[in-house]
Image (cartoon, rainbow, N blue to C red):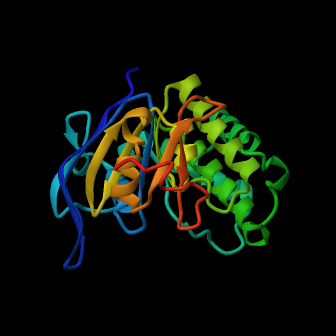
């Protein structure tokens, strides 16, 4: 079965009278890993929530293949789109296994009966995120990093064609960040899952994503492969930050080296590109 395409056309989203996204066009490459990057408050999380139908556009539309997302039944959308929002909240006292199991709800019938497939998918999600030993623990007792892995496991248990994640590496140390991003790349390679994620770390985004969408002030300023998007000019435009771009010695992807006020480069000897 072909992975459905996801796109936004002339999309505008506002919070009350405050516009956040304006006349935005985005095409998510099916079967690829796409990163959404940009400065604080530029609309990254808002775009992800609009793509998942959590936010209703004030203008334009989100399309799944050629069908407006708002025209599809909620259960069908939940079977196709999995979402890890920013700072999700768990019910008080719920165990890890029960929370991850809620990812199976869209696949179950009216009475919520569990199948062998449900048990298998949840067990795999717990194992792949390294939290199988926490299955019987209350989510309330866990550290921030452990909770983040629980939420990622729930998103994986939803077993959708498209997975949307808002800052999936939040609260994780560098080792667990790499584990989670490796897991998402494996999921993409093995199942063809389309992965869309908001990432603050530009170098991890560049290394792990096939495509990047760079936002500034609610508009797309660049979209394409990391080598096309990650340039000194874009880093200066989007983040107001001078930088050097060199090849990542591990992956060959563009590596951003910020130059702050106390950088060691002598401007007379190493003028920054404009």
Q: Quadrant of the N terminus?
A: top left
Q: Residue at x 40, y 43 (%)?
A: 231
- Please count the marks in the image: 0
Q: Residue furthest front?
A: 268
Q: Is residue 143 above or below residue 201?
A: below
Q: Residue 23 vs residue 236: left or right?
A: left
User: Is residue 233 visible from the viewing direction of this image?
Assistant: yes
Q: Residue furthest right?
A: 133
Q: Is residue 167 above or below residue 144?
A: above
* Residue 134: quadrant of the picture: bottom right
Q: Residue at x 78, y 50 (%)?
A: 131
Residue 107 percent across, percent down from the top left: 50, 41
Residue 187 percent across, percent down from the top left: 59, 31
Q: Residue at x 54, y 55 (%)?
A: 266
Pick the front one: 132 or 262: 262
Q: Residue furthest bottom?
A: 17
Q: Residue 273 vs residue 98: left or right?
A: left
Pick the front one: 114 or 138: 138
Residue 135 percent across, percent down from the top left: 79, 54
Pick the front one: 15 or 21: 21
Q: Residue at x 20, y 34 (%)?
A: 66
Q: Residue 51 vs residue 91: left or right?
A: left
Residue 193 percent across, percent down from the top left: 49, 31
* Residue 72: quadrant of the picture: top left
User: Is residue 108 visible from the viewing direction of this image?
Assistant: no
């Amino acid at each position: 079965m072909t992975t459905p395409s996801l796109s936004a056309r002339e999309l505008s989203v506002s919070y009350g009278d405050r516009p956040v996204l304006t006349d935005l066009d985005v095409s998510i490459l099916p079967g690829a890993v796409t990163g959404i990057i940009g400065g604080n408050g530029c609309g990254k999380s808002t775009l992800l929530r609009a793509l998942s139908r959590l936010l209703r556009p004030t203008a334009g539309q989100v399309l799944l293949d050629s069908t407006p997302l708002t025209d599809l039944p909620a259960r069908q959308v939940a079977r196709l789109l999995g979402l890890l929002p920013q700072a999700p909240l768990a019910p008080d006292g719920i165990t890890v296994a029960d929370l991850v199991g809620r990812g199976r709800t869209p696949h179950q019938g009216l009475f919520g009966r569990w199948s062998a497939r449900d048990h298998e998918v949840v067990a795999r999600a717990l194992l792949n995120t390294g939290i199988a030993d926490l299955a019987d623990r209350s989510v309330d007792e866990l550290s921030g990093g452990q909770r983040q892995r629980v939420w990622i496991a729930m998103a994986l248990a939803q077993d959708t064609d498209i997975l949307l994640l808002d800052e999936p590496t939040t609260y994780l140390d560098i080792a667990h960040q790499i584990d989670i991003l490796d897991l998402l790349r494996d999921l993409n390679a093995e199942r063809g899952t389309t992965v869309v994620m908001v990432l603050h770390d530009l170098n991890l985004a560049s290394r792990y994503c096939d495509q990047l969408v760079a936002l500034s002030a609610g508009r797309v300023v660049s979209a394409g492969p990391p080598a096309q998007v990650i340039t000194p000019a874009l880093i200066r435009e989007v983040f107001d930050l001078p930088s050097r771009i060199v090849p990542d010695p591990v992956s060959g992807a563009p590596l951003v080296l910020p130059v702050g006020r106390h950088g060691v480069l002598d401007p007379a000897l190493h003028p920054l590109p404009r």
